Image (cartoon, helix red, strand yellow):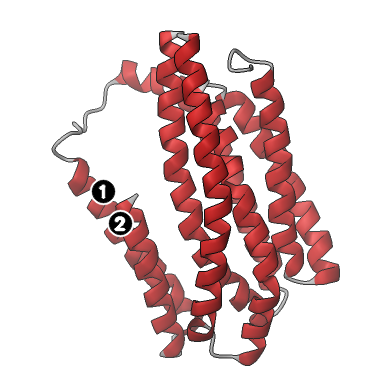
Amino acid sequence: MNARIISLILNIVLDNLAIRLNYGVSGVAWATVIIETIYMIRLVNLSKDTVIYKIDKECLKDLLKLAKHGIVDRIFDRGGKLVLDIILSRLGTYEYAAHVILNQIENFANDFCYGFGIGITTNIGIKLGKNNKKEIEDIKNVINKITRILTIIIPIIIFMVLLISLPMLLKEQETLMIAYKLIPLVVIYSALMPIKYKYTSIITGMKELKYNAQVSISTNTIKILLSYILCKYIGISGAWLTFSISCIIIIIALKRKIKNSSLSS
């Protein structure tokens, strides 16, 4: 998580530098490629003393059986983002520029929640393996408390960061005004994010990867269609409204699945 946070900070700095030096979209793209390359090298260096890189056919078969639904989930998630970016890029330079900066800042909270989710997945998997009802109930209470705290703290931090950083990151007045108008929607989305990660991580810990993939396919399809319609009528605000709606759909679908499982009260 630390490596990812550092890469995100560097990405924002280099993106801003590329824009200020008039390198345009290609400069921003090169900045992203450079940072991601450094990030991957850093991860390899961190893991080389603890991870043995060896191809084992039997292990690979078992891994693919377990990971295939997760792969589908990520493919549809990335594919949905690609199509969404194509839709948003056609809204105009100012709106898209505002969206990119807001999205980069939101990614800090997103990555933090992702790290929180990994902890949930690990703990849920361990407790379910032990099949101890008291320990399962205890971890549920801890997860719920942390989620409630994050649901309050993250939107407040995002709101303050946006107010302080946007005037420094956006030089065009038109782009800045668009970004300010989007702040309420960004804050709402950031409040829903910890809840979404809570449920997706619990489902992953339960090894319900197939269900996760099904939800991902459905929500990404809805996200693309809804964002296309809303962006057509209300501009870039439609995209951030779609993010929140998608989060709510995911939360409802996964919460219902968990209620019918061994983790239900």
Corner quadrant of residue 87: bottom right
Q: Quadrant of the C terminus?
A: top right
Label 2 neighbour load within 10 Å: few <14, some 14-19, many 20+: some
Identify the disc placed on residue 43: 1
Image-quadrant location for residue 190:
bottom right
53 sits left or right of 26 in the view = left
Give the residue pinned by disc 2. 39
Q: What label sits on residue 10 in the rendered view?
A: none
Percent of width and height locating residue 169: 49, 82
Residue 239: give x, y in percent of width and height.
71, 62
Amino acid type of disc 1? Leu
Q: Is residue 64 visible?
A: no
Q: Nearer the viewer, residue 129 or 209?
A: 129
What residue sits 69% from the left and 61% below the top?
Answer: 240
- Across and down, in percent, residue 114 comes to 47, 45
Considering depth in this image, is 231 or 133 the residue closer to the camera?
A: 133
Inspect the image, locate mark 2, and give the three-letter code of the amino acid beneath it. Tyr
